Amino acid sequence: MKAVFEPIYNSLNQSFHYGMFQNNEFKTPWHYHPEWELTFITESTGIRSVGNSIQAYSAGELVLLGPNLPHCWKTNSTNEQTAKSTFIQFNKDLLGKDWLEKEEFLLIKKLLEASKYGLIFNDEISKIVGNKMLHMNFISPTLRMIEIIKILHELSLEKYEVLSLGARFDVNSIVSDRIEKIIDFVENNYQHKIDASQLGELVFMTSVSFSKFFKKAFNKTFTSYLNEYRVSRACELLKESEFSVEQIAFETGYQNLSFFHRQFKLFTKKTPANYRQEFYK
């Protein structure tokens, strides 16, 4: 699951790439590309990885990603919904050379600069912009271009949340066997006890060397990464199952219920019960 370069296949006579995806699941690996990407999830739930951020996602979210930021959406395997999304991808020459240096695009420039860390927008604006992106499927390329600028301007006036916790990934360091093995191991073993010595053995490093390597690569400790992943899985179960909070804690690798509550609130700012209640509302 290493971050791989994904070329965006686009017509030489087109300034951007607009598309709608539909399949049983999101299958694209953790990848990056030099284009900006605006993605609206119309259907599906699962885990979203952007840079060093790991969060549960659901239908209705709108995310803006900057160039060369590793990312992927991984569908919940227990969910029978189809995975659907609508996306727009464009490079720095969308409106020609140096268009972002023009005064009229100052707010859009600030938005795109902030997106190098990955941005997610609130539910209200996500729904509005998402519907506009869906409607773009029925209009001409010229009107699509106009709509893209209007959408970027609209988003530049909104508040957003930074996804990658202020960390900018060095894609060269991510494309490595070590990172691939670590991410894959966590995905398959998060329900069990995992420590630095296990991961160190996996990538042929001492536990101390592994901890330093991980902190440098992800800009966070491995313990923080593991808890963030477990909490994201817990969020999925709170939305998709009728398991009790205690059972969900156990299913996601927590043997101590109070510790699970503390970690859950640390990453979501909510208790598990409040999270489930707000989702069903």
Image (cartoon, helix red, strand yellow):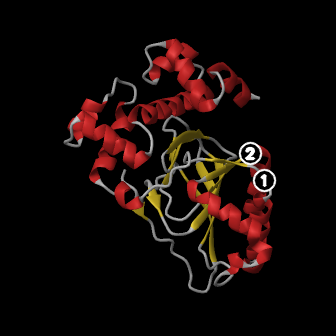
Q: Residue at x 78, y 76 (%)?
A: 103
Amino acid identity at mark 1: Glu
Location of the C terminus by quadrant is top right
Q: Which of the two residues, 180 or 141, is positioned nearer the viewer here?
A: 180
Which of the two discs, 2 and 1, sits closer to the camera?
A: 1
Please state if 189 lies on the left or on the right of 268 as rendered: left
Q: Determine crowd level at label 2: few under 14, some 14-19, many 20+ residues with C-alpha closer than 10 A.
A: some
Residue at 55%, 69% (x, y): give it: 35
Name the amino acid, label 2: Asn
Q: Classify 154 as above or below 210.
A: below
Q: Secondary structure at mark 1?
A: loop
Q: Is residue 185 visible?
A: yes
Q: How many marks?
A: 2
Label ID, residue 158: 1
Which secondary structure lies at badge 2? loop
Q: Are marks 2 and 1 in contact (CB under 8 Å)?
A: yes
Nearest to N terminus: mark 2 or mark 1: 2
Looking at the image, residue 162 lies above or below residue 87: above
Residue 87 visible in image: no
**Residue 162: image location, x then y, percent:** 62, 48
Viewer-side residue, 187 vs 222: 222
Q: Which mark is residue 122?
A: 2
**Mark 2 to mark 1 CA distance (whole Å):** 9 Å
